[in-house]
Amino acid sequence: MIDDDRVFKALADRTRRFLLDLLFARDGRTLTELESELEMTRFGVMKHLKVLEGAGLIVTRWAGREKLHYLNSVPIRLIHNRWIDKYTERQVSALADLKTGLETQAWQKAKAKKRA
Amino acid sequence: MAEGQGKKTGMTTQIHEIYIRATPQAVWDAITTPEWTAKYGYGGLAEYDLRPGGAFKGRTPPHMLSMGMPEVAVDGEVVEADPPRKLVQTYRFLFNEATKGEGFTRLTWEIEPTQAGFCRLTVTHELEGAPIMAAMVGSKFSEMGTGGWSWILSDLKSVLETGKAMGA
């Protein structure tokens, strides 16, 4: 199972985010192709890819002797649903509540004035 | 030469993977029956004749007909049906002449039970020669972040696990 911790941890690194951006621009790349875009040892890049794969952010497939890396955007989408939507929704409902509150107040004031 | 070709295919393929707390049969039904497909994503109604060569149709939901979508929005053919584990099909958007002209792409759904109560659903979409469809099913389709496989699959997960779609 993929948990949020692993996804956040994987995303909390500049190199790994850069690797995701590379795959976003062009999917299905080999380690050699990805390595050529980074100033890092092959082993270093492999380690980062492993973390990304463990978090479900990358899926790999073999094509003959080549291992291809694909971006899997689903975990990011799930985090978006869980963390972003939730809080923006709250902002929207807070504004809605504020509107209701102000309007009710105004209405009650008007009613009181009429009575007076 | 063959290797170069393979690489090209690799680059136009999109793979999306999601873990869902449901049985393989429930996931299978959610993909292949209109009662389920109406509940998530665009709410289109899937019709499958689940045997090799059988027809596939994705009917436009009523609320999208008024937006000028054709009655059948997606069509294709079943290549392989192994319920509730694997479904291979072709897939074409009939939204307009341009998407229709791109022709059929190949879609593979794989459902594997993982740990207790969970399944891994992998959707592999081979999109060679279909750049318009590739952009639509990719992760940057709309500014609102709707559309694309990651959106549809996370909604499918939500429906299967909670009974509710994300927007509901």
Image (cartoon, rainbow, N blue to C red):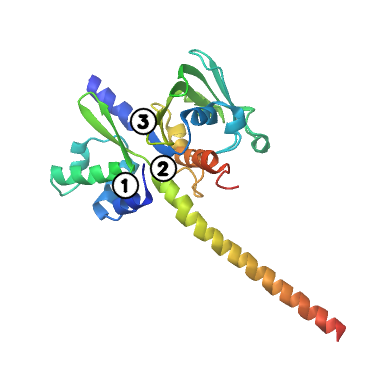
Residue at the disc numbered 2: A74
Please say if the residues under marks 2 and 1 sit with CB atoms less than 8 Å apart. no
Measure how far apart labels 2 and 1 are at the Cα level.
15 Å
Q: Position of residue B59 (x, y in %)?
A: 61, 28
Total labels drawn: 3
Mark 2 element type:
helix
Q: Residues within 10 Å of mark 1 (few under 14, many from 20)?
A: few
Query: Visible in this render: residue B59?
Result: no
Residue, x 26% and y 33% (percent of image)?
A68
Residue at the disc numbered 1: A21
Q: Amino acid at mark 3?
A: Thr
Q: Position of residue A89 (x, y in %)?
A: 55, 58
Quadrant in the rendering for residue A106 = bottom right
Question: For this rendering, which residue is in front, B155 or A16?
Answer: B155
Residue, x 60% and y 36% (percent of image)?
B43
Sequence-first tag of 2 and 1: 1
| As drawn, B53 above or below A29 | above
Residue, x 40% and y 48% (percent of image)?
A76
Q: Position of residue B37 (x, y in %)?
A: 57, 32
Quadrant in the rendering for residue A24 = top left
Measure how far apart labels 3 and 2 are at the Cα level.
16 Å
Q: Amino acid at mark 1?
A: Asp
